Image (cartoon, rainbow, N blue to C red):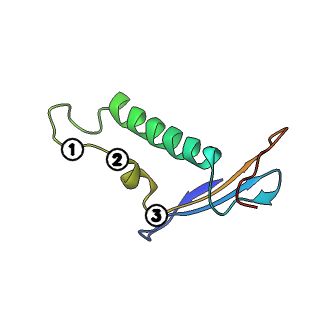
Amino acid sequence: ALQYNSTYSEQVFSFVNNINTREGGTHVSGFRTALTRAIVKFIEENNLIPKNSKISITGDDVREGLTSVISVKVPNPQFEGQ
């Protein structure tokens, strides 16, 4: 689940097999990468920023004001932080 709000900070709540993973993990990194890629692709496909413009969208731009909950099920998890 994800929702944008008017703040500048990002809040990510992540879980693996219903265990809170406060320090993140590969599932959080993958989510951030996929979200940035999807939004940049949408912007390019809909010509929302002119191609000759010097504006570029970064991951920080995409995640500003984002609150998200990531929950994944992994058959054989290897937790390092517990």
List the residue tagged with mark 2: 58
Q: Quadrant of residue 81?
A: bottom right
Please, what is the three-letter code of the amino acid marked with disc 2?
Thr
**Cα separation between marks 1 and 2:** 10 Å
**Cα separation between marks 1 and 3:** 20 Å
State which tag comes first along the sequence, 2 or 3: 2
Q: On the picture, is 60 further left or further right than 79?
A: left
List the residue tagged with mark 1: 55
**Cα separation between marks 2 and 3:** 14 Å
Q: Residue 28: give x, y in percent of width and height.
A: 60, 49
Please, what is the three-letter code of the amino acid marked with disc 3?
Gly
Please, what is the three-letter code of the amino acid marked with disc 1?
Ile
Give the residue furthest to the bottom. Answer: 7
Residue at coordinates 50% horizontally, 64% vertically from top-left?
Answer: 10
Between marks 1 and 2 in the image, the one whose residue lies nearer the viewer: 2
Residue at coordinates 74% horizontally, 55% vertically from top-left?
Answer: 15
Residue at coordinates 46% horizontally, 64% vertically from top-left?
Answer: 65
Helix, strand, or loop for circle 1? loop
Counting other residues with Cα less than 10 Å from the Cα at mark 1, is it few (<14), some (14-19), or many (20 or more)? few
Helix, strand, or loop for circle 2? loop
State which tag comes first along the sequence, 1 or 3: 1
Figure disc tally: 3
